[in-house]
Amino acid sequence: MYTIEYYSEDVQDEILTLPDGLLARYFNLTDHMVIYGANLGEPQHYQ
């Protein structure tokens, strides 16, 4: 398991003000980063 640390509390607060869609994507990516680390691989391309 990995830990995500923010530069400052202000940065973390600013992230939480993102629009809902972006915030959901952010949480999804950071959940994966906590488990697998920063190497998330290539983005998925759906057609």
Image: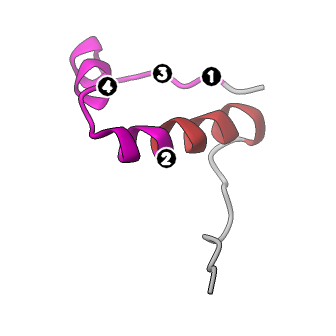
Between residue 29 and residue 8, name the one nearer to us.
29
Badge 3: residue crowd in 10 Å (few <14, some 14–19, many ≥20): few
Indicate yes or no whether the magenta region holds residue 11: yes
The magenta span reads: 3-25
> Residue 16 — which label?
4
**Can you tell which of label 1 and label 4 is closer to the viewer?**
4
In this rendering, is residue 23 above or below 43? above
Residue 7 coordinates in the image, percent (x, y): 32, 23
Q: Please give left or right for residue 42 compared with residue 21 in the image.
A: right
Looking at the picture, which amino acid does disc 2 mark? Arg
| Circle on res. 3 | 1
Determine whether, in the image, residue 24 is placed left or right of residue 13. right
What coloring was used for the rendering?
Answer: secondary structure
Residue 38 percent coordinates (x, y): 62, 46
Alpha carbon separation for disc pair 4 and 2 = 12 Å
Q: Are marks 4 and 2 in contact (CB under 8 Å)?
A: no
Q: Could you tell which of marks 3 and 2 lies nearer the N-terminus?
A: 3
Residue at the far bottom in the pictured view:
47
Q: Which residue is identified by label 3?
A: 5
Residue 20 x, y percent position in the rendering: 35, 38
Which mark identifies residue 25?
Answer: 2
Q: Nearer the viewer, residue 42 or 16?
A: 16
Residue drawn at 65 percent across, 39 percent down: 33
